[in-house]
Image: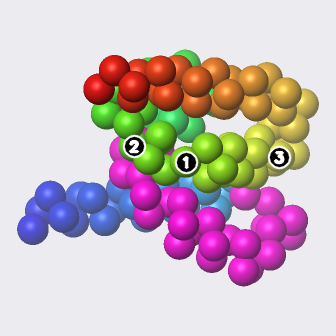
Amino acid sequence: MSKFSAQVSLLFIVVALVCAFVPVLSVDEGEVKTLWDTCLVKITPKCALNIIAVVFGNGTLSDLCCSDLVKEGKLCHDTLIKYIADRPSLIAHETEYLKKRDEVWNHCVSISKTL
């Protein structure tokens, strides 16, 4: 039960981070629900945080998280990272973040082929 509670807590943290980084006025409610229903539920909260840390910082990504990312799909990965990168405080470096997003995706696809 404690492990489940910790996972639920991590999920709420990821949701809070995504909501904090997603520009509220540029995303309609239906689109957010679609992203939630189709994307965020496919990846563990820990891996989601690790992927965000890699793209927007100096985090590291495990092979397991790469596998989760590939299962999530490129469209979900691209869309979620783009929403975060579109924040006014990050927009100056958007090209850099989108390049890093693509590097992470390509790395994870190559890793997942060997698993």
**Label 3: how many residues lie within 10 Å, few (<14), some (14-19) or many (20+)?**
some
Residue 73 horizontal side relative to residue 97, left or right? left
**Foreground residue, 33 or 24?**
33
**Label 2: how many residues lie within 10 Å, few (<14), some (14-19) or many (20+)?**
some
Q: Is residue 86 above or below residue 18?
A: above
Q: Residue furthest left?
A: 1
Image quadrant in which the C terminus is located: top left
Q: Amino acid at mark 1?
A: Gly
Q: Magenta span: helix, strand or loop, mainly?
A: helix
Q: Please provide the residue range marked out in magenta.
A: 22-49
Q: Amino acid at mark 3?
A: Asp
Q: Which residue is mark 1?
A: 73
User: Residue at 50% of width from left, 28% of height from top?
Assistant: 109
Residue 20 horizontal side relative to residue 95, left or right? left
Q: Is residue 111 above or below residue 50?
A: above
Q: Which residue is mark 2?
A: 68
Q: Is residue 26 above or below residue 29?
A: above
User: Residue at 69% of width from left, 44% of height from top?
Assistant: 78
Sequence-wise first label, 3 or 2: 2
